[in-house]
Amino acid sequence: MASSVSNGVPETGSGLIVSFGEMLIDFVPTESGVSLAEAPGFLKAPGGAPANVAIAVSRLGGKASFVGKLGEDDFGRMLAGILDQNGVDGRGINFDQGARTALAFVTLRADGEREFMFYRNPSADMLLRPDELNVELIRSAKVFHYGSISLIVEPCRSAHLKAMQVARDAGALLSYDPNLRLPLWPSPEEAREQIMSIWDKADVIKVSDVELEFLTSSDKIDDASALSLWHPNLKLLLVTLGDMGCRYYTKNFHGAVEAFHVTAVDTTGAGDSFVGALLCKIVDDQSILEDEQRLRRVLKFANACGAITTTKKGAIPALPTEPEVITLLEA
């Protein structure tokens, strides 16, 4: 059995976690609680859920790589540099000569929740082709993690499906966080259909309470609603509930782990931090998924990571290191 750090949390594993999808720049208002039009100015914050997960893993001492496409522009080079500075392997990054790096303007409402306006028409991440994939890198993944934004248009959708197949054939654990961004989809129906089109391939799925309501077309956030999303090959289904913690479901047990209470400034990246924490603790020891006590300790650790991430503006600057998380756990 893997050794553990303080609080009985398993050690971070050394297996490679490959994160696939988009990386972009979020422009965050300098003042919270105002609309985009009223914001006096914006700070640029690197983001994109799959890239956030890769950096979250690396910050916690894990081994992470990112596969995606950036614009051959100043912002694209800046993002590649940020991955590099954070110890994320960039061999899976492609640059597009003709398309820009994606931008998103993110409003932080007074309650710390977000509204999005995207500039992608098309952005470089949408143009990743199957033949551009670093197949050797993907084959070396112990965990392959992805979202659903890469399913919206071709050719990126085909690249996503091929990468998933390569990873599965090589024996990787497939981790899926749909990360619903409705403004990017042609319609809610299309979003639901495409998100569900790859549902039964994943071993681990994380949804937020809002995504659970959307995917089940129900306003109930309960066990029955969550279990309606269960599929026979799934090893772990997680529902994150913001400041109410998370719920977990496996073949043999289910339960809830409460949140840590902190003063939230910006919820951006909290879910990605949670996912990165989970993945780097199970990458070398998937038996944790079948041991409720050890899984609960990992989820408590992941909740702490998510909580810390909400205490600063922007996703990547707020992603914690292991000592910061242990401090919160011991407090």
Image: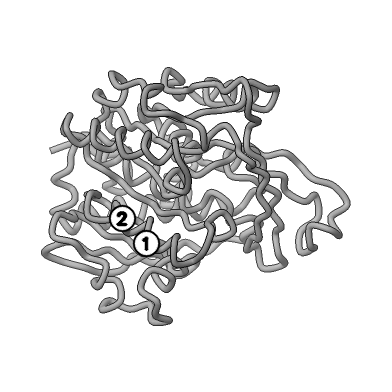
Q: Which residue shows up at 43% across the image and 69% down it?
A: 209
Quadrant of res 15? top left
Q: What residue appears at the point 79 percent right and 45 percent down from the top-left corner?
A: 42
Amino acid type for the residue under numbered disc 2: Ser
Cβ atoms at labels 2 and 1 below 8 Å apart: yes
Q: Is 140 situated left or right of 69 in this image?
A: left
- Observer able to see residue 331: no
For label 2, the residue is 197
- Residue 155 point in image, percent of width and height: 44, 36
Residue occupying image coordinates x 70% and y 59%: 108
User: Could you say where residue 314 lies in the image, as x and y percent from the top left?
Assistant: 64, 45
Relative horizontal placement of residue 32, taking residue 2 as reference (left or right): right
Residue 252 visible to an observer of this rendering: yes
Along the viewing direction, whichever of 145 and 314 lies nearer the viewer: 145
Quadrant housing the N terminus? top left
Where does the image place residue 210, in percent across and percent down from the top left? 47, 69
Q: Is residue 116 above or below residue 104?
A: below
Quote the CA–CA distance across marks 2 and 1. Answer: 6 Å
Residue 190, by quadrant, is: bottom left
Q: In this view, does 77 lie above or below 167?
A: above
Q: Name the residue under label 1.
A: 193
Q: Which residue is drawn at 28% across and 55% down?
A: 199
